[in-house]
Image (cartoon, helix red, strand yellow):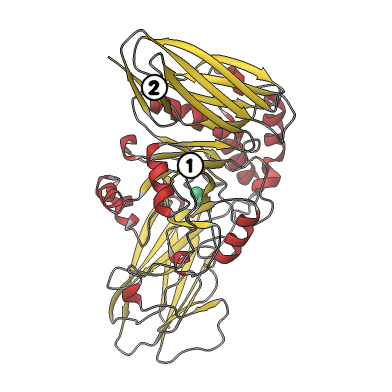
Amino acid sequence: MPVYTKTFTPSENKTLTEFIVPIIKGTKEILIKGDYHPKIVNDIQVTNNLIGQAVNEYLRFDGKDSVFFGPNWDYYQNNYIKNAIKWFSPIRNLFNYTLIDPNGLVRARGNNNFFETMQINKEKASIGSVSGALPAGEWRLIVEAHAVISELVKLSIEVNLNQKFTPGIKATEKYRAELRDFHKKEPLFKEERESPGWFGGDFHIHSHHSDGDHSVYELMTYLHGKGLDFFVLTDHNTTLGWKEKYFSKTLVIPGIEISTFFGHFVLINWIGDINWFSLERKSTFEDIAVEIKRKGALLSVAHPECISDPICTGCRWNYPNFCWGTADIMEVWAGSWSERRAENIKTLKRWENLLNQGLKVIAVSGSDIHQLEPYKKDYGRTYVWAKSKTREGIMEGLKKGKVYITCGPKINFQLMTDKDVFVSLGEELEVDCNTSIELLINIENKKNKKKLHIELIKNGLVYNSYDSFLEHIELDWSDKVTKNCWYYLRLLDEKKCIVGLTNPIFIICH
Ligand SMILES: [Zn+2]
Ligand SMILES: [Zn+2]
């Protein structure tokens, strides 16, 4: 049996190693199984130091916007530091692999199933793999070294080529469609054509096709129960989940989370593989950005200020030579706001800086769930104004930035000129300089009877604010515009955690 081996040292952290796997004619089945040692860092001192450094970096924030620190900031920081060792030990060495056939199709991915036997034959494939004919020729086995922390890590990948099928391998799914139809066939998710309105969704969800625990059907049922109108399926480096065919009232938008060594990005409205290996080598997005646009997908930078190596390897956005003009969307609200406020605050500031540079990057939220429970109360729900609850409708609203995020309050925010022209989220208003405008704010805060702090942000600074305990809040503020600017609203609870934020309205001054 062919075994591909390599010993890695920390200097080979964040590198790709390619093995050629020759597949001969008549091969009926491939069984692939990875292994490496040690799996975790055994030295407690080294582990504690590494966690300490990552946590320091995560909590460091040199902004001056004191409103974010709030009354509980010290408690939050101390609690994080106190629990970090418990949460993040042990530190793992981490490898993934990808097996690519001579036609360039990804046929197997080893991430959370790295150590299990993956089976691929004409009729069946393990979850995360693709069934179908096994063309003879040179297959590529690419090993991704996401974290090499130990001095020496010995890796081996066993690839068995069989002349007949092996029965009884667990976790396989039935043959579904001819491989050649993979890109052509669309699943039959039932799209409910409803009238226009705000539809609430989650832009970051994992299934068992990468490192999540559940099937797409289980996710649909569960998230429908949570009242979501839609979600974007964002498995790591695969869109295999899109092949599951189910009917549900919760709309699924196909997507993928490309997990590179220097950050994660999500493609929304995307089906199929993407050659991110060449992206790692060239360190440029230009080639794939064209393809993404051509296919009508949008690029979202996921959890850009997430805790990073070696706790969550490659999770913070630090992509070399990345041009922010390539990003359509930013995940400004990652996971639970209260738990991840350190990174969400930093992301919010990064987003405001991009807006100040004239880039119209749209803010969304993503829970990034891998398990079902608990679906936390302060996960952001992203509302998109759409003509209908369909994939096209949501994508159209999203592109326009008719989007706000909330974990409770419903928000309506519009601008009006003295000539009674209205504009709302994502829109541009062209006016003569020195025009007076009215900012009309309507908030419904039924569920939460506690105080809501409302802030109107202009060009990244607080322009006006107001506190209210009311269920229905109506505000009518005014401003005189003298140059190009943008406004958005953010709502904070008593702990100074964000409970709602809108996308901006832009003013162009002549
Ligand atoms: Zn991620
Ligand atoms: Zn994710």
Visible residue check, residue 474: yes
Visible residue check, residue 318: no
Q: Which residue is mark 2?
A: 421
Location of residue 313 in the rendering, given as x and y in whole percent from the top left corner:
50, 48
Q: Mark 1 falls on what kind of element?
A: strand
- Mark 1 residue CB less than 8 A from any atom of ligand 2: no
Three-letter amino acid code of the residue under disc 1: Val
Q: Which residue is mark 1?
A: 384
Three-letter amino acid code of the residue under disc 2: Val
Rendered residue at 42%/78% (across/down): 131
User: Residue 206's mark?
Assistant: none
Crowding at dot 1, Cα within 10 Å, few <14 / some 14-19 / many 20+, comes out as many
Residue 412 in which image quadrant: top right
Residue 136 vs residue 51, the one in the foreground = 136
Residue 370 in which image quadrant: bottom right
Residue 192 vs residue 51, the one in the foreground = 192
Rendered residue at 51%/72% (across/down): 127
Q: Is residue 254 left or right of residue 173?
A: left
Residue 310 vs residue 219, the one in the foreground = 219
Location of residue 388 in the rendering, given as x and y in whole percent from the top left corner:
45, 50
